[in-house]
Image: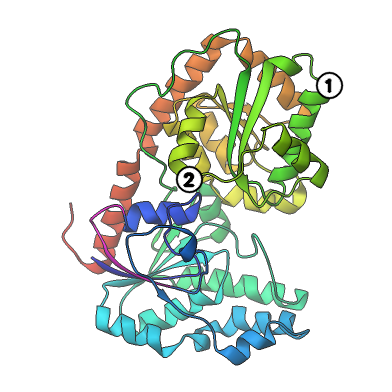
């Protein structure tokens, strides 16, 4: 199948949705993919394809740097299909795809452009809803918010195939004749334990790898500083944190860097090595009301990558979050649903003293992986849905 991938987020070998679609469309042979994107992230990675890079017209870019920007972005979110440059349309016509694929959440004008392109080519539009429309940033003036959300929901209903990143996302988006849950694709599980058994004399090491932006940075800061300053086992527990976009305090950043608690951003292969040297993998999700909808609807690729690392997982998140909902099905992670860092710290101490529970969590996570979250299972589901949509042979 020939897929024209038009989106603000191209498939990249990085964490999150970009890596998910890199695994689907680049690493595997089922799709012949042409990538067109307005993202400037492409240059940061070694990739095996040559994307078509484009931008909005120069005059429009200049307007986004003026005080009119909130209204310019509002118009962009609602009428962005008109900004698609002709080089993209011409490239698509030459490529002759079976479908056009786009990322619809978070919301960006390229989704509307992809919709117009699909209609022009008379091919199906496939839209992936990985986040709610305003997750990350909403650059338009506030009066635009309800109209943009309505356009986001309308776009969902108009997609020929809507791929929802979690059950919570599908529930929030509502009825659709061809909507399916497509969980992110995690890494493949190592065949053997990546590290020798831990010595009882080593510090109990807690690993985190991923985005440290938004509320995640302050959550991790509160937990680490509580254990550092008040924990009864400060010397017996250590953290190894990797990622970028850190939103924690400057004081904590300086301390964590000097103490080698924070190791910055690493390539995924190196992250896997660091995770294999750890005793517990931490997955936080926000508790505040202003992020509740995001945590209900998104699904962290990090959770599925963690399964592949063969280490016990601790999820610190509200009961309604997508990660806790799935973990409860399999008892695949220790779930702390109290927002207080003291509660999370106490559970960490209990796990550090309970090797049998840690072994059980690893076993249950393996069952979760093999049952529904094996990369081959998730990818096979996408291929089957795309074949049905495009009229190809069924498996």
The relative height of residue 21 versus residue 50 in the rendered view (above or below) is above
- Callout 1 environment at 10 Å: few (<14), some (14 to 19), or many (20+)? few
Would you say residue 201 sits in the magenta stretch?
Answer: no
The relative height of residue 125 versus residue 79 in the rendered view (above or below) is above
Relative to 97, 173 lies left or right? right
Evaluate if marks 2 and 1 touch, with contact meaning CB atoms under 8 Å apart.
no
Label 1, on which residue? 230
Circle on res. 267? 2
Q: x%, y% of residue 277?
A: 51, 24
- Callout 2 environment at 10 Å: few (<14), some (14 to 19), or many (20+)? few
> Within the image, what quadrant is residue 114 found in?
bottom left
Q: Residue furthest top?
A: 200
Relative to 191, 355 lies left or right? right
Relative to 122, 165 lies left or right? right
Residue 329: in sight, yes or no?
no
Q: Which residues are magenta?
A: 27-36
Q: x%, y% of residue 11?
A: 41, 60
State which tag comes first along the sequence, 2 or 1. Answer: 1
Q: Helix or strand or loop: what does disc 2 sit on? A: loop
Residue at point 32% right, 26% down?
191
Residue at point 46% right, 56% down?
18
Would you say residue 31 sits in the magenta stretch?
Answer: yes
Colour mapping: rainbow
């Amino acid at each position: 199948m020939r897929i024209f991938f038009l989106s603000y987020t191209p498939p990249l070998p990085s964490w999150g949705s970009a890596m998910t679609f890199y695994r689907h469309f680049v690493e595997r042979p089922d799709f012949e993919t042409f990538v067109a994107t307005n993202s400037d992230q492409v240059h940061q990675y070694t990739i095996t394809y040559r994307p078509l890079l484009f931008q909005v017209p120069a005059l429009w870019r200049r307007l986004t740097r003026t005080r009119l920007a909130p209204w310019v972005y509002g118009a962009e979110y609602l009428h962005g299909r008109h900004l698609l440059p002709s080089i993209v349309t011409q490239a698509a016509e030459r490529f002759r795809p079976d479908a056009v694929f786009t990322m619809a959440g978070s919301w960006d004008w390229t989704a509307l452009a992809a919709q117009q392109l699909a209609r022009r080519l008379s091919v199906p539009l496939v839209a992936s809803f990985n986040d709610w429309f305003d997750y990350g940033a909403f650059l338009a003036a506030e009066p635009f918010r309800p109209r943009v959300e309505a356009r986001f929901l309308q776009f969902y209903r108009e997609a020929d195939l809507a791929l929802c990143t979690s059950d919570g996302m599908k529930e929030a988006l509502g009825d659709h004749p061809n909507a399916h849950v497509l969980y992110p694709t995690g890494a493949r599980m190592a065949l053997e334990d990546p590290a020798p058994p831990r010595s009882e004399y080593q510090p109990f090491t807690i690993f985190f790898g991923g985005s440290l932006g938004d509320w995640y940075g302050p959550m991790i800061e509160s937990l680490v500083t509580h254990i550092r300053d008040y924990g009864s086992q400060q010397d017996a527990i250590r953290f190894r944190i990797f990622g970028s976009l850190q939103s924690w305090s400057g004081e904590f950043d300086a301390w964590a860097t000097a103490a080698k608690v924070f190791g910055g951003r690493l390539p995924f292969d190196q992250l896997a090595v660091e995770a294999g040297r750890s005793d517990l993998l931490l997955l936080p999700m926000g508790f505040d009301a202003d992020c509740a909808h995001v945590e209900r609807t998104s699904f962290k690729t990090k959770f599925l990558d963690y399964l592949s690392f063969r280490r016990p997982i601790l999820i610190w998140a509200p009961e309604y979050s997508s990660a806790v909902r799935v973990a409860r099905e399999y008892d695949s992670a220790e779930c702390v649903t109290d927002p207080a860092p003291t509660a999370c710290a106490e559970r960490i101490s209990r796990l550090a003293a309970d090797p049998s529970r840690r072994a059980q969590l690893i076993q249950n996570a393996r069952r979760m992986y093999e049952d529904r979250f094996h990369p081959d299972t998730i990818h096979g589901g996408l291929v089957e849905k795309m074949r049905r949509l495009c009229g190809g042979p069924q498996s």
